């Protein structure tokens, strides 16, 4: 083997060694071995090559950046108001649900009170229904009249439909002995022996005047309830201001809206009272 061939073989072996360090493919090594394995072995048997020792590159390791970001994000989510410190309705200056509910309740009570006066201030069917009756003579036990009979107002009369015959006399006695100044009469046609009829006298000027006064009192009571509801809402806004849990601009706007809600409630009360007075005065 001349020097030129020896140089070629040496060059090929050197390239093969570097390819092996760099991770050559299996097929390239096999291809090389199939062509020059014999010459390489014979050459290295006589002239071994000095091969530099391999060097491994070490890399410093550090925690992943996304892990740090995740931990920071978890802390932010923990401190975020959305995770547990959500504002409740009591912290919202624009929440008027309690105010509106109180005003609606006051108006409903007003309507109930006025419905008892629309017969001229003389008759109240609920008073008659709640009248205590002694079903058995000699017994101290009493029950409500509507537990024994049905009260049906019809114009200027009231019909009492008694459930059982033995309760006719106790019911009549209870009505006559009450302060209602009413006298029940049996069915004039005789068609229903369990029917009692009470004639309601027409309202007089005095009874109308008394009824109008009662309407005024009921209106004042409803107005007081509306003002009390406003006081509760104002107290809430004041607490938010002192606690600095709402912006001053929001509190100012909420105060204006609160007054509008109260004004609507007061106007509704006045409308109902005026209508009831007009109805009573017209007969």
Image (spheres, rainbow, N blue to C red):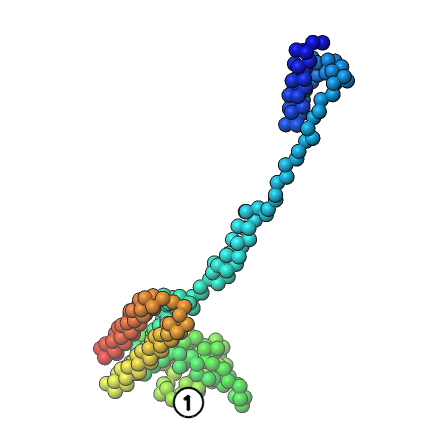
The image quadrant that residue 213 belongs to is bottom left
Q: Which residue lies furthest to the front in this view?
A: 3
Q: Which residue lies furthest to the right in this view?
A: 45
**One can see residue 189 in this view:** no
**Residue for point 25% across, 85% down:** 209
Give the x, y percent position of residue 116: 34, 78
Q: Nearer the viewer, residue 171 or 1?
A: 1
Q: Which of 263 and 26 is in front in this view?
A: 26
Image position of 8 with respect to 68: above or below: above
Give the x, y percent position of residue 110: 34, 76
Q: What element carries label 1?
A: loop
Residue that badge 1 annotates: 177
Give the x, y percent position of residue 72: 53, 54
Image position of 215 with respect to 38: above or below: below
- Specify the quadrant that holds the C terminus: bottom left
**Residue for point 66% across, 33% down:** 55
Query: How dense is the environment of label 1, judged by Cα within 10 Å: few (below 14), some, or many (20 and up)?
Result: few
Q: Residue furthest top?
A: 2
Give the x, y percent position of residue 19: 64, 24
Q: In this view, does 165 lie to the left or right of 92?
A: right
**Residue for point 31% across, 75% down:** 155
Q: How many labels does the image show?
A: 1
Q: Nearer the viewer, residue 265 or 61?
A: 61
**Residue for point 27% across, 75% down:** 270
Image position of 12 with respect to 155: above or below: above
**One can see residue 137 in this view:** yes
Q: In this view, does 16 lie to the left or right of 115?
A: right
């Amino acid at each position: 083997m001349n020097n030129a061939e020896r140089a070629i073989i040496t060059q090929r072996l050197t390239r093969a060694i570097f390819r092996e360090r760099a991770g050559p493919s299996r097929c390239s090594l096999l291809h090389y071995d199939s062509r020059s394995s014999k010459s390489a072995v014979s050459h290295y048997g006589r002239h071994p090559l000095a091969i530099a020792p391999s060097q491994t590159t070490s890399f410093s390791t550090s925690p992943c950046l996304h892990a740090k970001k995740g931990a920071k994000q978890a802390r932010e989510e923990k401190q975020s108001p959305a995770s547990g410190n959500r504002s409740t309705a009591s912290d919202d200056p624009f929440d008027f649900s309690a105010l509106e509910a109180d005003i609606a309740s006051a108006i409903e009570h007003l309507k109930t009170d006025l419905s008892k006066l629309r017969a001229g201030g003389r008759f109240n069917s609920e008073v008659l229904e709640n009248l205590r009756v002694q079903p058995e003579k000699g017994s101290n036990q009493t029950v409500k009249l509507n537990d024994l009979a049905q009260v049906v107002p019809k114009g200027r009369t009231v019909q009492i439909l008694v459930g059982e015959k033995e309760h006719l006399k106790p019911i009549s006695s209870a009505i006559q002995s009450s302060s209602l100044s009413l006298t029940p009469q049996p069915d004039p046609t005789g068609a229903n022996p369990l029917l009692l009829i009470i004639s309601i006298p027409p309202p007089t000027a005095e009874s109308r005047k008394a009824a109008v006064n009662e309407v005024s009192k009921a209106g004042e009571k409803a107005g007081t309830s509306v003002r009390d509801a406003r006081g509760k809402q104002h107290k809430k806004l004041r607490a938010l201001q002192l606690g600095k849990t709402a912006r001053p601009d929001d509190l100012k706007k909420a105060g204006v809206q609160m007054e509008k809600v109260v004004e609507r409630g007061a106007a509704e009360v006045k409308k109902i009272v005026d209508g009831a007075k007009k109805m009573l005065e017209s007969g």
